[in-house]
Image (tube, rainbow, N blue to C red):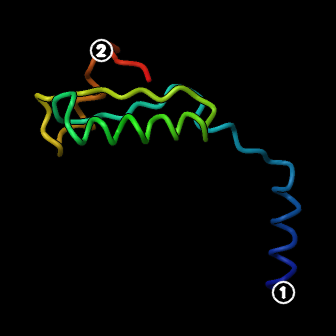
Amino acid sequence: MKFAVVVAISLATAGAYAQNYPARTVRIVVPYAPGGNTDFTARVIATKLADVFGQQVVVENAPAARPTSAPSWSRRRRRTVTRC
């Protein structure tokens, strides 16, 4: 019985396709000043992610933001960024 349910669900969802991820520019928020080790590491990772995703990856430095508040800071921030 369980097998029949699994087969039915698989056939019902066989035509569903996921959308391409990421659909827009990826942003990495670095809560420290530019030029440090964290910034350098984020830019290296951004370059590799851009190759993997085939999408632009942007590194934003937010020295005023604490590491714990970086996600909320990035939602309120205007789109002034440094592009990799």
The tag earlier along the polypeptide, 2 or 1, is 1
Disc 1 secondary structure class: loop
Instruction: Kindly report the distance in space between the C-alpha atoms of the residues bearing marks 2 and 1.
Output: 54 Å
Camera-nearest label, 2 or 1: 2
Q: Identify the disc placed on residue 52.
A: none
For disc 1, the marked residue is: 1
Q: Residue at x 30, y 14 (%)?
A: 78
Where 54 sits versus 48, above or below?
above
Q: Which sits in the foreground, 49 or 3?
A: 49
Tag 1: amino acid: Met
- Label 2 Cα crowd, 10 Å radius (few <14 / some 14-19 / many 20+): few
For disc 2, the marked residue is: 78
Q: For the image shown, how many numbered marks are present on the structure?
A: 2
Q: Residue at x 68, y 37 (%)?
A: 20
Where 10 sits versus 78, above or below?
below
Left or right: 47, with 10 as reference point: left
Q: Which sits in the foreground, 42 or 76?
A: 42
x%, y% of residue 76?
A: 26, 23
x%, y% of residue 31?
A: 20, 36
Figure quadrant of residue 59? top left
Looking at the image, the residue that sits furthest to the bottom is 1
Tag 2: amino acid: Arg
> In which quadrant will I find the C terminus?
top left
> In which quadrant will I find the N terminus?
bottom right
Q: Which sits in the foreground, 71 or 53?
A: 53
Figure quadrant of residue 83? top left
Q: Residue at x 25, y 41 (%)?
A: 38
Left or right: 26, with 76 as reference point: right
Disc 2 secondary structure class: loop
- Label 1 Cα crowd, 10 Å radius (few <14 / some 14-19 / many 20+): few
x%, y% of residue 75?
A: 30, 27
